[in-house]
């Protein structure tokens, strides 16, 4: 049963990809395919990263409405990038190879995420209200620090950063795509290997330990995976708040059962479908100039509200 | 045997356990009794390596619970705490199936299916096996969780107030099942329990705790004595022998 749904979703994703690549194409096919193909790859890679990181976060936090971005993960990434620019200065920042710069931010991000969120998750009881509060406070703190730093940086230099941070699904940072794809593949593989462990972790700390999971260590490992996924996605398309929530909520509706072996794949496929189909429609069918992210964020925000109002906070 | 050696535990500055030492015999049912705040649940969590002790060691069946790998321990001891909030949307059978996780790592075979059905039948859950957990009453949920623990098929079974939410029928049934497991299968159930008459009827051994220390530890008949229990709970308790069983009158 789950297998057939996954196949159906894979088929829909393939159709969406074919439509994205071929719809309205005129002229040199080699150029079109490489141009659109790169963008397509970027859409799928980032979508999967955001959706899977959200699912992983929901598993270790034991609820279905929190996401890494609500908890301030991507705000943390922005803060680190801003701090890096502040420390190096505009010239140093631009001179630094973008891959190396990305690697430095990634390492810092992973450490910071484990340090901050690890302590939050570590307690013997996971209090949802405390987590939401701390998440909101972290998010506001990180954003305020970023904007404080931004005010202290020369506006010309800040423009460099802005181009990086305010990427979108329309303007993906393609020069990082290669290294990003590798990183995301490694992180996804790590998550996939933990799929059965994640099933047990979703039952909560005490039951997971009872079942023989080294819970506290695995929370840190999963936080590390989340940090990598969020960093890469944020570097490529900038902060996206509600997309992950939209995808995981839809996946819970579509996929029966609880197994991560099904849900991880379903989240990835669905993220691809929504982004690729959405982008195809926006670019080709409606010729709209509204960024896709605006619509997705609106739908995701609605999903968030509905979840809260229906009391699905567990 | 469970060997507890000078276990200390504190939350912040308040001391919960002050150097507790006790031995709980194998193949016997032990009930941990005592007033609120005596440290009963904390001791159970420490035995089950859910929290690390500040000092001292605990051995279960010869394994030091702080040193032994968690997955090895999961095949030796199973534990159920009082409050369990489960985020996943699980069916009863799926939850009970998790009891096989330490043995199979998520790949159950036919034999596991039999074990799962056995645990479901034992807790009278077969009619609800395909219901979701959030469609159950409190008592049914509790039984589903206990079924998962029994399905784990470990030598040591630690339960924190397992009779919570259970009606008279199922309370009695559970205690009979556990007693049977101790006497017939050589398992070692350890229960934190508030109803001392259930302890009197079914437990072979009693660990009485008060103010973070051991108040008394011994065979049930020796503990069920007027002065000892009255002092333990700071309330007058009279023990009557009814049909050869000690019954505590405390109301």
Image (cartoon, coloured by chain):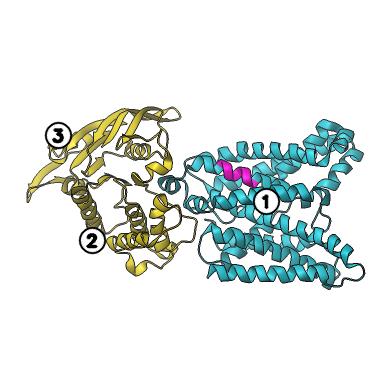
Q: Chain of mark 2?
A: B
> Do circles 2 and 3 both sit on a common chain?
yes
- Label 1: state its secondary structure: helix
Residue B78 drawn above or below residue A29: above
- What colour do you see for chain A? cyan
- The answer to whether residue A134 of the structure is visible from this angle is no
Contact, CB < 8 Å: mark 2 with mark 1? no
Query: Nearer the observer, disc 2 or disc 3?
Result: 2
Let me know if residue A223 is in the magenta part: yes
- Both marks 2 and 1 on one chain: no
Residue A163 placed where, x, y %?
86, 47
Residue in the picture at 61% in, 39% down: A114
Query: Hey, which residue is sitting farthest front in the picture?
Result: A30
- Residue at the image point whose x is 66% and y is 64% from the top: A270
Tell me the SS state at disc 2: helix
The residues colored magenta run A220-226
What distance separates the C-alpha of mark 2 from that of mark 1? 54 Å
**Does residue A241 appear left or right of residue A291 in this picture?**
left
Chain that appears yellow = B
Question: Is B80 in front, or is A95?
Answer: A95
Residue matched to label 1 = A185
Q: Which residue is mark 3?
A: B227
Apparent side of residue B226 relative to residue B117 in the rendered image (left or right): left
Residue assigned mark 2: B169
Q: Nearer the viewer, residue B172 or B5?
A: B5
Separation (CA) of disc 2 from disc 3: 31 Å
- Please tell me whether residue A7 belongs to the stretch shown in magenta: no
What kind of element bears circle 3?
helix
Disc assigned to residue B204: none
């Amino acid at each position: 049963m789950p297998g057939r749904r996954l196949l159906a979703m894979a088929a829909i994703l393939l159709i969406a990809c074919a439509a994205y690549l071929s719809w309205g194409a005129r002229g040199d096919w080699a150029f079109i395919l490489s141009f659109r193909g790169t963008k397509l790859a970027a859409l799928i890679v980032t979508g999967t990263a955001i959706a899977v990181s959200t699912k992983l976060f929901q598993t270790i936090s034991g609820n279905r409405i929190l996401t890494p971005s609500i908890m301030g993960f991507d705000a943390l990434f922005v803060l680190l990038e801003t701090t890096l620019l502040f420390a190096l200065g505009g010239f140093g920042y631009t001179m630094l190879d973008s891959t190396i710069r990305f690697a430095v931010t990634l390492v810092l991000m992973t450490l910071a995420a484990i340090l901050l969120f690890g302590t939050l998750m570590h307690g013997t009881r996971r209090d949802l209200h405390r987590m939401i509060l701390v998440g909101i406070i972290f998010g506001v703190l990180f954003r305020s620090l970023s904007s404080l730093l931004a005010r202290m940086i020369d506006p010309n230099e800040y423009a460099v950063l802005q181009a990086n941070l305010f990427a979108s699904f329309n303007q993906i940072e393609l020069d990082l795509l290669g290294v990003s794809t590798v990183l995301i593949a490694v992180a996804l593989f790590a998550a996939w290997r933990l799929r059965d462990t994640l099933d047990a972790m979703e039952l909560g700390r005490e039951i997971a330990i009872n079942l023989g999971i080294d819970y506290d260590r695995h929370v840190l490992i999963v936080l590390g995976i989340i940090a990598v996924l969020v960093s890469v996605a944020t570097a490529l398309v900038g902060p996206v708040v509600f997309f992950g929530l939209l995808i995981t909520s839809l996946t819970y509706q579509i996929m029966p059962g609880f197994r991560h072996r099904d849900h991880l794949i379903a989240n990835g496929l669905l993220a691809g479908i929504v982004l690729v189909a959405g982008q195809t429609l926006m670019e080709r069918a409606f010729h709209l100039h509204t960024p896709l992210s605006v619509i997705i964020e609106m739908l995701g925000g609605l999903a968030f509200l509905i979840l809260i109002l229906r009391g699905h906070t567990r | 045997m469970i060997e507890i050696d000078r276990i200390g535990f504190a939350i912040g500055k308040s001391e919960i356990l002050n150097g507790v030492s006790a031995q709980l015999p194998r193949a016997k049912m032990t009930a941990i009794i005592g007033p609120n705040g005596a440290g009963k649940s904390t001791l159970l969590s420490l035995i089950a390596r859910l929290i690390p002790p500040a000092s001292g060691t605990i051995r279960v069946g010869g394994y030091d619970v702080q040193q032994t790998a968690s997955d090895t321990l999961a095949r030796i001891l199973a534990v159920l705490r009082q409050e369990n909030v489960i985020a996943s949307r699980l069916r009863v059978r799926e939850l009970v199936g998790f009891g096989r996780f330490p043995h199979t790592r998520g790949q159950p075979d036919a034999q596991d299916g039999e074990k799962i059905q056995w645990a479901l039948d034992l807790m009278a859950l077969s009619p609800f096996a395909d219901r979701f957990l959030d469609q159950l009453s409190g008592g049914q949920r509790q039984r589903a969780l206990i079924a998962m623990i029994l399905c784990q098929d470990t030598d040591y079974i630690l339960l924190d107030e397992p009779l919570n939410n259970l009606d008279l029928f199922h309370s009695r049934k559970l205690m009979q099942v556990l007693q049977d497991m101790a006497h017939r299968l050589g398992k070692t159930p350890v229960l934190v329990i508030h109803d001392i008459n259930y302890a009197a009827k079914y437990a072979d051994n009693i660990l009485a705790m008060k103010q973070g220390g051991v108040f008394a530890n011994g065979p049930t008949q020796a503990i069920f004595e007027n002065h000892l229990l009255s002092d333990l709970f700071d309330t007058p308790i009279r023990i009557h022998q009814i049909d050869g069983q000690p019954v505590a009158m405390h109301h």
